[in-house]
Image (tube, rainbow, N blue to C red):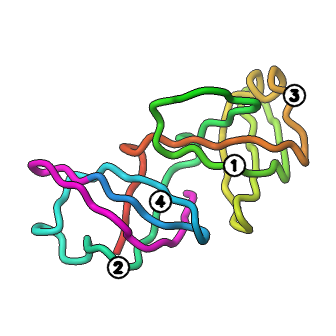
Amino acid sequence: MNTLTGIINAIDSDGSLSLVDIAVAGTHTMSALVVETPEQCPWLRQGNNVRVLFKETEVSIAKELRGQISLRNRLSATVTAVRSEGMLAEISLDFAGQQIVSIITSRSARRMELKVGDGVEWLVKANEISLSG
């Protein structure tokens, strides 16, 4: 499980859903769509520290991505390791001094010609992120 720490800097709620923006690794922002509101969850408050959690299988990798995309979490990183075994490849990334791991198909890793030192973007849908107070 990938884990980053951050500070909640904005919360927009509608019904039982909240879109939470979290400052991670300094000035980077990640967003999480959670089925909770500040009224239901005491730690869900602007300025609070939280852990940002997401599975390795939910991290997509893009190389030379251009244009707009609906995914709210699109962050730059550098490939630090590529381990391919069978059908799956584990891609380790350096994101502002933090390690992020992505599990993609070996076929995709080969097609993208991923190698150590490559600059990439990693992406995670907001609804695939969990928060912990």
Type of amino acid under label 2: Asn
Circle 1 or circle 4, nearest the eye: 1
Whole-percent x and y of residue 78?
80, 51
Residue name at image x 75 percent, y 32 percent? 63
Q: Is 127 placed above or below 31 here?
A: above
Type of amino acid under label 1: Ser
Q: Is 51 placed above or below 15 here?
A: below
Q: Quadrant of the N terminus?
A: bottom right
For mark 2, does the 10 Å Cα neighbourhood hold few (<14), some (14 to 19), or many (20 or more) residues? Answer: few
* Pointer 1 residue: 76
Circle 3 or circle 1, nearest the eye: 1
Residue name at image x 54 percent, y 29 percent? 68
- Sequence-wise, which precedes: disc 3 or disc 1? 1
* Pointer 4 residue: 53
- Sequence-wise, which precedes: disc 2 or disc 1? 2
Between the C-alphas of marks 2 and 4, the distance is 16 Å
Between the C-alphas of marks 2 and 3, the distance is 40 Å
Between the C-alphas of marks 1 and 4, the distance is 18 Å
Q: Quadrant of the C terminus?
A: bottom left
Type of amino acid under label 4: Leu
- Sequence-wise, which precedes: disc 2 or disc 3? 2
* Foreground residue among 11 and 59: 11
For mark 1, does the 10 Å Cα neighbourhood hold few (<14), some (14 to 19), or many (20 or more) residues? Answer: some
Circle number at residue 113 = 3
Of helix, strand and loop, which one carries label 3? loop
Query: Which region is colored magenta?
Result: 1-18
Magenta: main secondary structure:
strand
Circle number at residue 48 = 2
Q: Is 49 placed above or below 16 here?
A: below
For mark 4, does the 10 Å Cα neighbourhood hold few (<14), some (14 to 19), or many (20 or more) residues? Answer: some
Q: Are marks 2 and 1 in contact (CB under 8 Å)?
A: no
